[in-house]
Image (spheres, rainbow, N blue to C red):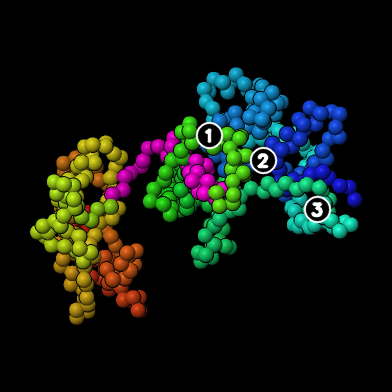
Amino acid sequence: MHIHDLIGIGFGPSNIALAIALEEGRDARPQHRPLDALFVERQPGFVWHRNMLLDQAHMQISFLKDLATLRNPSSRFTFLNYLHEKDRLQDFINLKTFFPSRHEFNDYLAWAAAQFEDRCAYGEDVVEVLPEPRAGEVKLLRVRSRDAAGAVRERLTRHLVVGVGGAPRILHHQRGGRDDPRVFHSSHYLDAIAGHGQARRIAVVGAGQSAAEIFMDLHGRPQRPQVDLVMRARSIKPSDDSPFVNEIFNADFTDFVFSRSGSEREELLNEYWHTNYAAPDLALIQQPLDFLGINFYTRSVLNGRQQFVTPPGELGFTDMGWEIYPQALTQHLLRITREYTPPPLVITENGMANADSIVDGRVPDAARIAYLRGHLEALAQAVALGADVRGYFYWSLLDNFEWNSGYQKRFGLFHVDYATQQRLAKDSAHWYRDAIAAFKAGR
């Protein structure tokens, strides 16, 4: 059986760059026997983030950090030479950018990969790598791969390079998530969303570059679905691409990282995760907002030494210990309107926890009715004074699980018996229903 000097698993950007380096090393030392290298790729042809080639997506790194420039600026495999061969160099210069579109960079990668088709076995999935002992020593590895027809191919190699990319992470623990076609990873986005083009509500889970790009892509589609961005973090943080931080992408930083111990390498990765694709570009997330959501429950009072103090509570306190002070909602909305020139405002949360109980088949919660009335009047006053408020959502419809209080605090308009799940409309639910009807009728 033929023995290769090197087999690479996967033929994405990293292994294409390796193939280029081997090719140029061969050209630089014609007197030496060239390394016999082969790459095995499961895809039927070259593909790079095919399902994330969005029209408005651009690279996050300079085109000078391509497959070859930092190692060999005179290489024929540089992005600049690709532009020259495609008769695009002048056009790209006129764009005045270091960041090509993802479509164009994908075309560059495909152009480079096409020059190594004789050294890449496409359509084969590596299923096993085994040691090949000979004369009591293991100096070879046996690489087994399977093609689409199920045929198994074996090859021997002296060296193995693994460049298979990342693994998708999906919330499979959600009920039916593993087999539900509505749940898919960003690596399948364009194909999958084509089958759900009429969806009216879509949740995007994550806070990185892919999540931000998908969020903006969905907002730009003709049907304009409601898109909710769900994330573990409190907010989206932009990537840090400042000059000093960007030094970690210098070629010699790789040698520095790999010279560290395992624990030190892990610390470095944790320290610099936000410089990579885990965090989106600031330019991408600095997009105009459709609306600004405001959660409002109470105010905070500080003394002259900037210390929090207990407010007077003339209208009382909720079951959470929060002061009831509706006029702060008016003040808050007017301050935002005056200082920030915001998009339309929506009160996304406003409500109170009350010690509710069932009495003769009903839940008398006069305190919640007073809270609702006071805050709706405060909202109306803010609108009359110029605040552009388009909506109001009470928190919440049902008694619910509170992260810091469990089931102890009841915020709902409907009482929930947690043992039986039976729901009962509180007096406040009836009052709120009538208030909405009166508002619609212009009363």
Q: Secondary structure at mark 1?
A: helix
* Depth order, front residue of 349/64: 64
Crowding around mark 3 (Cα neighbors within 10 Å: few <14, some 14 to 19, many 20+) is: many
Question: Of marks 3 and 1, which one's residue comes earlier in the chain?
Answer: 3
Q: Tell me the magenta residue range.
A: 265-294
Residue that carries the numbered disc 2 in the rendered image: 14
Identify the residue at the far left of this view. 314
Quadrant where the C terminus lies? Answer: bottom left
Instruction: Residue 257 in the image: state x and y as whole percent.
Output: 59, 43
Q: Are marks 3 and 2 in contact (CB under 8 Å)?
A: no
Indicate whether residue 275 is drawn in magenta: yes
User: In the rendered structure, which amino acid carries the disc numbered 1?
Assistant: Glu
User: In the rendered structure, which amino acid carries the disc numbered 2?
Assistant: Ser
Indicate whether residue 9 is drawn in magenta: no
- What residue is rendered at 74% in x and 45% in y? 8
Residue that carries the numbered disc 3 in the rendered image: 141
Instruction: Residue 405 in the image: state x and y as whole percent.
Output: 30, 67
Q: Are marks 3 and 1 in contact (CB under 8 Å)?
A: no
Relative to 324, 2 lies left or right: right
Q: CA distance from mark 3 to mark 1?
A: 37 Å
